[in-house]
Structures are given as C-alpha cells and as structure tokens.
Image: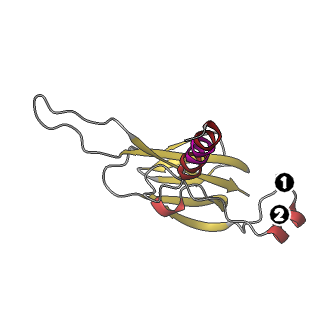
C-alpha cells in the first residue's frame, strides 16, 4: 500500500477512537447535566438560580448534579439506597438535623455529597476489589 493511504487509514482510525471516548452509556461515571432552559438562563443571569424555594425537599440518587431550593428553616431529606456513604454538607447554609436530613440554616448555597462503591467489597482472603467510587452531589440554594 502506498504511504499516503496508510497515513489516511491511521488518521481515520485515530478519529474513530477519539469519537468513541466518552460515549459509554453505562452511567457509572457520568452525572446528569443541570437542567435549565435558555430563556431562564438569559433572564436570571449566570449566578442566579431559577428554582422556587420549598419548605421541604426530598432528593434521591437520580438528583445527582442538580440544584434544588429550600426556604430558610426548611428541610432537605436525602433518600439514598443502602451502600452510600453518609451524606455531608459543605458551607453554613445547611445544618444537619439528623441522619440524612438537613435544615436550611441561612440564605446561601451548600453542596450535599456522598459516594458508593461501584463494585463489591472483597469478602474473602485473596479477593481483590476495584476500589472505584460513584460520586453523588446536589447543590442546595437556601432562600
């Protein structure tokens, strides 16, 4: 084969490999994008939140990567299946009430985070574990 054809084949193969990266639909390492319509982004500005504050909010594993709003004094309840690490809150906007419940302490933003093992923990001598974790994060705006 001529050198030009081989070079073209190599470039094409590299392009296919790059195009395939990140197209895994297994979901073990991807987080959903934040839902926001273009019209609400334009009217509220880049740092303002478009969600309405509620007195009580419940979040689940499906809410990872999203933003929720709660009123000052309101409650955020986290419902994650067994196997998730204890949920932690960043910042002073949320105060831990009990277990996986948090109160809106003062106006501001906080992140709730947790993680779970992707593969089982080794149970016997000589067994190996993968050590991979799946992260979970929800941004809470307290108003």
Q: How would you classify the magenta stretch by its main secondary structure?
A: helix
Residue 114, image x, y percentages: 46, 45
Give yes or no for contact between labels 2 and 1 (Cβ–Cβ under 8 Å): yes
The quadrant of the picture occupied by the C terminus is: bottom right
The residue labelled by disc 2 is 41
Based on the picture, tell me whether residue 95 belongs to the magenta stretch.
Answer: no
Residue at image coords 64%, 46%: 110
Mark 1 Cα shell of 10 Å, populated few (<14), some (14-19), many (≥20): few
Find the distance from the CA under tag 2 to the CA under tag 1.
Answer: 7 Å
- Residue depicted at 52% across the width and 52% down the height: 30
Tag 2, which secondary structure? helix
The magenta segment is 8-14
Task: Choose top left, top right, bottom left or bottom right for residue 38.
Answer: bottom right
User: What label sits on residue 37 in the rendered view?
Assistant: none
Q: Residue at x 67, y 65 (%)?
A: 35
Q: Residue furthest front?
A: 1
Asked whether residue 134 is in view, the answer is: yes
Tell me the colour scheme of the image.
secondary structure
**Relative side of 62 to 41, left or right:** left
Tell me which label, 2 or 1, sits earlier in the chain: 2
Label disc, if present, on residue 46 of the rendered structure: 1
Q: Quadrant of the N terminus?
A: top right
> How many discs mark residues in the rendered view?
2
Query: Which residue is painted at 54% across and 46% down in the image?
Result: 17
Residue 102 position within the rendered picture, expressed as x and y whole percent measured from the top left: 53, 52
- Viewer-nearest residue: 65 or 82: 65
Would residue 87 be seen by someone viewing this image from the given angle?
A: no
Vertical arrangement, residue 100 with respect to residue 63, above or below = above
């Amino acid at each position: 084969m001529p050198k030009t054809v081989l070079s073209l084949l190599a470039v094409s193969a590299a392009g296919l490999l790059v195009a395939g990266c990140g197209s895994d639909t297994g979901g073990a390492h991807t987080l959903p994008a934040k839902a926001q319509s273009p019209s609400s982004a334009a009217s509220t500005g880049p740092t303002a939140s478009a969600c309405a504050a509620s007195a009580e909010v419940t979040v689940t594993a499906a809410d990872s990567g999203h933003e929720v709003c709660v009123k000052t004094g309101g409650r955020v309840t986290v419902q994650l299946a067994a196997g998730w690490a204890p949920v932690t809150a960043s910042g002073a906007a949320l105060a831990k009430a009990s277990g996986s419940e948090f109160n809106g302490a003062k106006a501001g933003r906080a992140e709730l985070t947790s993680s779970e093992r992707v593969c089982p923990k080794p149970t016997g001598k000589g067994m190996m574990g993968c050590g991979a974790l799946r992260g979970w994060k929800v941004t809470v705006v307290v108003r």
